[in-house]
Image (tube, rainbow, N blue to C red):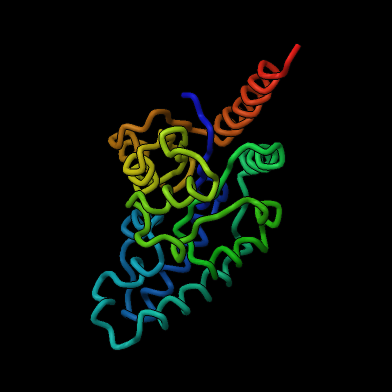
Amino acid sequence: MSIRAILLDVDGTLADSTEVILLGLRESYHNFLGHSPADDEIRGLIGRPLFDQMNLFGLEHHPSSLSERMDFAIGRFAAHQHLAKLFVEPVEAAVKLHLAGFPVAMVTSKNRLEIEEFWTVAPMLRPIPVVTADDATRPKPFADPALLACQMLGVDPAGAVMIGDSIYDIRCGKSAGAATIAVTYGAGRLADLDAEAPDTIFTHPTALANWLEAQQSKAHAKEKDRQPC
């Protein structure tokens, strides 16, 4: 792949936040419904925006407002935020790429409140441009978030790659005309991701970090080749 921009999902790609999301959604569903779906069902929702997650399983008919349900869920995520960990190697590689001037953006299904909460545990990622669920007209799996990120970076989507751990990330990237890389160390299952036919699959954070570092080396080599002798 000849890559001119990198679009990175957050949860499950840069952050090991599956337990935070799982606990927060489980408690939220139980609070409003009196019961919670099975963990496997909830896990399958990771990667969708919160306004979708809090409008399922009959919640769309609940007397509470969607904003009330979302606020409750964000509060539960915040209560468990201490359980979140970063995938350090990909995070460090992404920050280095950004500092080196390589076009990098985060494309997340978190809303603005959620990303602000996330930055309390990942302040080093704050300088990287981010597209949240509040920014795009339609969220993943639609192309809109990836297209907006490419517009922010000033690149053609055909030269970008979307990297994520859910089928929604892969579908978003493909819909935008970008290359796609799936990672299987997050919430997504290998069989589900493989069925989406991404261009590449990485099974460990180190593999993604090595690939990101290689893009920096390639960009540096191209820059040297363009310099006059």
Note whether residue 184 is visible: no
* Residue 198 image point, x, y percent: 36, 33
Quadrant hosting residue 220:
top right
- Residue that sits furthest to the bottom in the current view: 63
- From what the image shows, is residue 77 above or below residue 178? below
Pick whichever, 162 or 207, lies toward us: 162
- From what the image shows, is residue 71 above or below residue 123? below
* Residue 202 image point, x, y percent: 48, 31
At 67% across and 63% down in the image, what residue appears? 120
Quadrant hosting residue 22:
bottom left
Number of numbered discs visible in the structure rendering: 0
* Residue 11 image point, x, y percent: 50, 52
At 41% across and 75% down in the image, what residue appears? 28
- From what the image shows, is residue 46 above or below residue 25? above
At 39% across and 28% down in the image, what residue appears? 199
Pick whichever, 54 or 7, lies toward us: 7
- Residue that sits furthest to the right in the current view: 229
* Residue 185 image point, x, y percent: 49, 40
Of the 4 image quadrants, the one containing the C terminus is: top right
